[in-house]
Image (cartoon, rainbow, N blue to C red):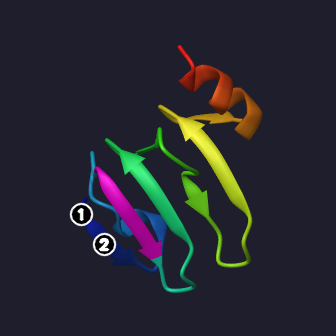
Amino acid sequence: MKTIKVRVWVEIPDNFTGIVEYLNETKYWLKDRLRHREDGPVVEISNGIKYWYLEGIYCYQINLKKTMLF
């Protein structure tokens, strides 16, 4: 998967799919520039906080696990 490093969100190309890493080491997984990841958190903030999204929609971790059981 392609990884790019950026300073601000507007530097991300249109319809980008891959990993975006900011200078502070915060990472985002994107699919067509939407936050999306099926095998882990989409956002990993450098302080350890994590967020889960599917197709750009925020999901609680427990809901994501239930969704993945289908």
Task: Give the magenta range.
Answer: 17-21
Percent from the top left, x then y, of residue 8?
47, 73
Specify the quadrant that holds the N terminus. Answer: bottom left
Q: Which mark is residue 2?
A: 1
Q: Amino acid at mark 1?
A: Lys
State whether residue 10 is above or below residue 22.
above
Q: Could you tell me if the residues under marks 2 and 1 are in contact, i.e. CB atoms within 8 Å?
A: yes
State whether residue 7 is above or below residue 41.
below
Q: Nearer the viewer, residue 51 or 34?
A: 51
Q: Can residue 60 be seen?
A: no
Q: Residues within 10 Å of mark 1 (few under 14, many from 20)?
A: few
Percent from the top left, x then y, of residue 54?
52, 33
Per the model, the C-alpha gap separating discs 2 and 1 is: 7 Å
Q: Is residue 52 magenta?
A: no
Percent from the top left, x then y, of residue 30?
40, 49
Report the side of 5 relative to 16 (left or right). Answer: right
In terms of secondary structure, where does tag 1 sit?
Answer: loop
Q: Nearer the viewer, residue 14 or 27?
A: 27
Tell me which residue sits at (54%, 81%) in the image: 25
Report the side of 52 relative to 48 (left or right). Answer: left
What type of secondary structure mainly makes up the magenta span?
strand
Q: Amino acid at mark 2?
A: Ile
User: Would you name the residue on which mark 2 appears?
Assistant: 4
